[in-house]
Image (cartoon, rainbow, N blue to C red):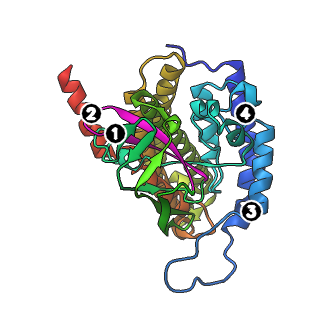
Amino acid sequence: MDFKLTEEERLIKETAAQFVDKELIAREGAYLAQPAPFLPPGAPARRELDSSTRSELTERARQVGLWTLELPENFGGSAISAVARVLIHREFGRSILPFRPVSIPEFLFETKYGERLADGTVSLALAFEEAHRTGELSRLQTLYRQEPDGCILRDSSIFISNPRADLFLFPAREQGTERLGLFVIERGTPGVTIGDEVDLTTDGTVARLVLQHCKIPNEQLLGYEYEAGAIIASEQLNIAGRSLGIGMRCLAASIEHARNRVTFGRPLEQRQAIQWMLADLSIEIRTSTWLALEAAWREDQEFTHFEEAALAKKRAAKMAFHAADIAIQIHGGYGVCKEFPFEGFYRDARLLRLLYGREDEIDRTEGQRFLRQ
């Protein structure tokens, strides 16, 4: 096993780091600034990146190949390894701005939606709600029945995190069998409605994709168990990469603050408790990095990597939450100020721990597999 980065992967990592430093972190001050000296009572308003800034960043990310990472060569993309994708998501994770590369499974570019997905005229949302608990689809409740003229979906309600998307990709289980199907469905399809949109955090919303008396063409059944599992593993690695970025940013900022902040006549860095916190966090980041890169390397080598991706996600997301907590403690009152990124990292990392496999569920699943060996 050789984790030495190729020349291309090093170049991709450096390009992503420069983009994040110059285009994202440099804009954080304006994004995080509070226009009023005091927030009104109740939940704070949702923060959004203005449309002109988002469009500008999207175009610049496209120009340097950091937008649609799975884009095939026939649409102007280039083959990027799984290791490179983790490194890109790690760099983007260092910024609190709600801007990161879009994730589109590669096989979707072979469908009738491929060209529009490639040029960004349509957007995609993954509706994998039932994978968020265990990181698997073993308890999938959405059912379908295949007919000669189309697939009939049982009435269902599915959680989605991007309610404004044009296409929704979701799994369903065939009635009477254990076979799983992977469907893409268009917004506005008869029987498809989106409702109950609410703010999830100050930076994002959630909604329900409701299916009622819904029938879709058989050609929109795009894959089966393996494709669905590969999507989950890919999302787990994306989360692991983003979590590593959160951890790196929190550690670097905490070290800098500890060196400069003087309390009771001594810099914080001279206090043993602070030293231990930072040393422990650095070890957590290194072990989480190893797990994420190992899982990505296994994918590149076409080895089984689903279990490794789940473990990498679990460890990295927990580390990111711990890193944000440490950064808040070391920065004191500044740590919880909304004009600093750490409270946002704290909320984001708490949510990442719940997506595509909760920690206790992943532990139980991996423990059962180990005992069966």
Secondary element at image label 4: helix
Residue position marked by numbered label 1 in the rendering: 173
**Number of residues whose C-alpha sits closer than 10 Å to that of mark 2, classed few (under 14), some (14–19) or many (20 or more):** few
Amino acid tagged 2: Thr
Label 2 with label 1: CB-CB less than 8 Å: yes
Q: Which residue has dot 4 on it?
A: 14
Q: Quadrant of residue 27?
A: bottom right
Question: Which dot marks residue 51?
Answer: 3
Mark 1: few/some/many CA within 10 Å (<14, 14-19, 20+)? many
Name the spot of residue 81 as percent of width and height, x first. 61, 24
Q: Amino acid at mark 3?
A: Ser
Q: CA distance from mark 4 to mark 3?
A: 27 Å
Q: Amino acid at mark 1?
A: Arg
Q: Is residue 369 above or below residue 221?
A: above
Tell me if residue 55 is in the magenta stretch: no
Task: Give the magenta part as a residue range.
Answer: 166-187
* Numbered circles on residues, count: 4
What kind of element bears circle 1? strand
* Residue 163, image x, y percentages: 55, 59
Q: Residue at x 57, y 55 (%)?
A: 187
Residue 177: numbered disc: 2
Could you tell me if residue 270 is visible in this image? yes
How many residues crowd around disc 4 within 10 Å: few (fewer than 14), some, or many (20 or more)?
Answer: some
Q: Which mark is residue 320?
A: none
N-terminal label among 2 and 4: 4
